Amino acid sequence: MKMHLLRCTFGIACLFLTACTMEQEVVIDSEKKEIEFFQTKTNVVDFFDQLIEDFETQHPDINVKQVNVPGGMEVLKTRIARGDVPDIFITYPIEQDYMIRATRGYLLDLSEENFISEIDPTIQERYAIDGRMYGLALSQNAVGVIYNKDVFEQLQIEIPSTWDQFISVLKKLEANDLQPLLMANKDLERVSVFNLSLVANTFDNHYWEAVNKNEIGLRGDQRWIEISNQMLEFLSFAQEGSFNMEGEDLNQAFMQGEGVMSVIGVWEIPNLEKINPEFDYGIFPFPATNDPELNKVLGGVDGGFAISADTDHPEEAKMFLEFLVEKENAQKFSDYEGNISTVKGVQQNNDKVHLLAEHISQGKSVNWPNHHWVGGTAAEEDFRKISQRFFYERDIDAYLERLEIMFEMYRQHQ
């Protein structure tokens, strides 16, 4: 009997202690401040998970929840429209979506934050609206041509610096029974990465201002006709079945030596390295014109972030952005992804990107033209679809007419 009572007493004590422990954990968890970090780059989810873990170790009272979903930009747009705004989310300067959100009071003013001074001002200033900044530029992306170094060496091919040289290289590869070019024309992002390089090297910011004001048209413009012909000429070297290939399939095919070149953004580097880290490849600037001095690398702010003006935890959100800007962390980010950091003192250590970085350091870069369009990310998505259809149908007149209609539609709704 005594033994039974002892066991009961011990059991009750254990339950009491367990309950106390659980209650204590609940209290501790309830004291944590959670901030949502919404970012759309699938290639760096693992990286940010690790960085978040490091941040939370330093700040045990803060929980950072990374959110990355398919169709992220559209999801973000929908969430903001219904008032479900993440604490921190990706944003691009100049783009209409950013301008609207900033001027309508959706974004927290970061102008006076000390960590803003750690960013290259020539890049950070792109966020300026009436002298105020509502976003942080952490990194820049860049687009170039990925190539198989072994093949170039075997055939003694020099990196082309003009469009004509580029076409000659494609022809030489074809003559040697090699697949000169891989294209993922089923993947809308890969379609636009290629042809926006031509568009960006042809039309400047003033041109897009005129388009947005309906002061200039596309149809009949010889410049549009010329770059459309360039697109079709380039497309003629793509593999059979390019319209059935997604971006991930292209990465696999390239890293297995099934094609010699492709147009790519540096953000794909982590995905390529996971497939075959020993593969010897490089990236050179896309030679859009026949004047090497005029060829500019397409790119812009890539890791750009804003804080919701309605966040419940503004100080904690700013602490996380400050953590991302710390030189050590920004260097890790650049080394992992191959991006070109905007943080002062961070080095570009990836030798595969050095030709692009060199161009950018010389001022030979151009921002994404779609960032200037009325319609923002919605217009960008439409442009991708219209371009994909053009690549398939190869009708220049129809292509330019559809683009004209697209811009007109967004002008009417602004």
Image (cartoon, rainbow, N blue to C red):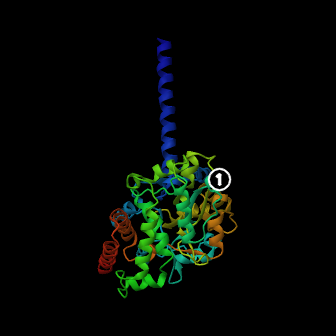
Total labels: the figure holds 1
Residue that carries the numbered disc 1 in the rendered image:
154
Image-quadrant location for residue 321: bottom right
Assess disc 1: are there few (<14), some (14-19) or many (≥20) residues with their C-alpha within 10 Å of its C-alpha.
few
User: Residue pushed farthest top?
Assistant: 1
Residue at the (62%, 64%) spot, across then down: 159
Foreground residue, 1 or 126?
A: 126
Residue 82 in percent (x, y) is at 33, 64
Residue 63 in view in this figure: no
Image-quadrant location for residue 86: bottom left
Left or right: residue 405 versus residue 150 is left
Residue 245 in view in this figure: yes
Kind of residue sitting beneath label 1: Gln
Residue 354 in percent (x, y) is at 66, 63
Q: Considering the numbered disc 1 on the image, is that residue within a helix, a strand or a loop?
A: helix
> Is residue 391 shown above or below 62?
below
Residue 16 in percent (x, y) is at 48, 32
Residue 341 in percent (x, y) is at 62, 65
Foreground residue, 265 or 289?
A: 289
Left or right: residue 405 versus residue 54 is left
Viewport quadrant of the C terminus: bottom left
User: Residue pushed farthest bottom?
Assistant: 215
